[in-house]
Image (spheres, helix red, strand yellow):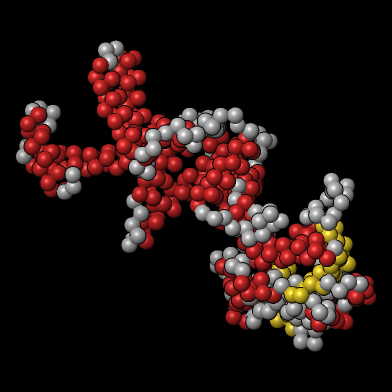
Amino acid sequence: MSTTPVRTRPALGHITVVGLGPGDARYLSPAAIDALEATPYRYLRTGVHPSASAVEGATTFDHHYETADNFASVYRAIHADLRAAALEHGEIVYAVPGSPLVLEATVAALMADHDLEVDIVPAMSFLDLAYARLGIDPIEVGLTLIDGHRFAVAAAGLRGPLLVAHTHAGWVISEIKLSLDDTADELGDPEVVALQRLGTDDEAVITTTWSAMDRDIDPDHLTSLYIASLNHPVAAEYQRFHLLARTLRERCPWDIDQTHQSLIPHLVEETYEVVDAIEALDPDDPTSDDDLIEELGDLLYQVEFHATIAEQQGRFTIADVARGIHDKLVRRHPHVFGDTASDPSGATSDRAGALESWEQIKATEKHRESIFDGIPRSLPALGLARKVQSKAAKYGFDWPDVHGALPKIAEESSELLAATTDDEQAEELGDLLFAVVNVARHLDVDPEMALRRATDKFRIRFSTVEALARERSIDLAEADLPVLDALWDEAKDRLGGS
């Protein structure tokens, strides 16, 4: 099956992409030289390459590397510049280090651009020289090529052998090293081979260890790493956790009996325990993180549990869950991962614009007819009311400010007092709570959290009342209202606050 993009209209610009090879001009192919000489409009991804001087009169994009915050922004900017140049001149040539189809994000973006016709002039990549210096057959040893910028993700679950490219700076090597904890153990300190400036007179092959690589290697733009074997796979902790969830499901009688439905109460309970742990965090006490770590782990286990059940049923796996949320977040953040043709900067103007874009994309994806579609009815009632009110407000069905919402509380209170039957009282009480939620929304106060705080305050004060009663041998169950009021007022004075 062809992977060539299907074009619905003729391309507006033509770009010939030339690979400069892995090292100096000795590795520049005749086909590349011919392509460079065929057009006067020449562009270089970077002039920091041994063969860059062969592209005479070229415009480089090194200024993007110097000004952008991250490489994704660099690649978007280069694509935008090349696109504009091709549409202006009709025909341009673009030269990149190594081979155009090996770890070249800008080339991938150009090939996906339906306004451009792209021809590739292949070249020897750094891979060929790396295999020669290492003396390995990549197929026989099962080598995996990894982008150093994405090491922790791309190498997840792998132990080697790995060839890691784009290790051009100390911070990249440090992040690679930090992706694994305690790699040097009773099994030894894994060997790491640094391949530097291959294909030049200054090439070097340095053998070091995982624990020492950030000290022994002085990286540059022509540095890659070879790791024959790791003691533990990357992301080993999650791998262990994932396997544990499967083992428990297969061997523990309680786990075996569970279903998606039977786990619902546990999922809800663990969620609220996470909330409690967050509220108990103390910025001045790092040990307060321990409860949050534990509760987040319990919640994560619930996610794994559901995925394990589904995996046994042959329906989906935790990989599907992770891939789904990853892809959804990318789709719904066009201001971060936007289409390079329409939004080269990838920026958004403000928080409100980002949220509006999120909602628009979400509505399109879900094919929803009503603004209320997708609001889970299983939400806590206060949160459900707030969500419904916020959605209606998007259509202008709302008070302009809190001063319009406040009188509804008095109105609904009067209707509640006038209700005579149980059904009427329940209905009017619901209307009163709904009006209170509306006031909270206009004040930008979460009614659920506000009520929780009020409940916590009541519990603390009443616990003080209980303590005072015990001190004075007062039986609260037998005490009259004046005694209770006096104890309550004393508790308030002791604790302070309103």
- Image quadrant in which you'd find residue 198: bottom right
Rendered view: 421 above or below 454: above
Image coordinates for residue 297, horizontal then vertical, percent: 48, 49
- Residue extending farthest to the bottom is 201
Image coordinates for residue 166, horizontal then vertical, percent: 70, 70
Write the residue at 55% across / 65% down: 181
| Picture mark count | 0
Identify the image quadrant of the C terminus.
top left
- Image quadrant in which you'd find residue 25: bottom right
Q: Closest to the observer: 361 or 461?
A: 361
Image coordinates for residue 414, horizontal then vertical, percent: 25, 22
Q: Using the rendered image of the protein, determine whether residue 229 is visible from the camera's viewpoint.
A: no
Q: Is residue 418 left or right of residue 292?
A: left
Image coordinates for residue 142, horizontal then vertical, percent: 78, 62
Rendered view: 209 above or below 378: below
Q: Closest to the observer: 146 or 497?
A: 497
Q: Using the rendered image of the protein, determine whether residue 373 is visible from the camera's viewpoint.
A: yes
Q: Is residue 40 left or right of residue 258?
A: right
Write the residue at 29% across / 30% down: 407
Write the residue at 18% across / 47% down: 497
Write the residue at 71% across / 72% down: 61
Q: Closest to the observer: 373 or 205?
A: 373
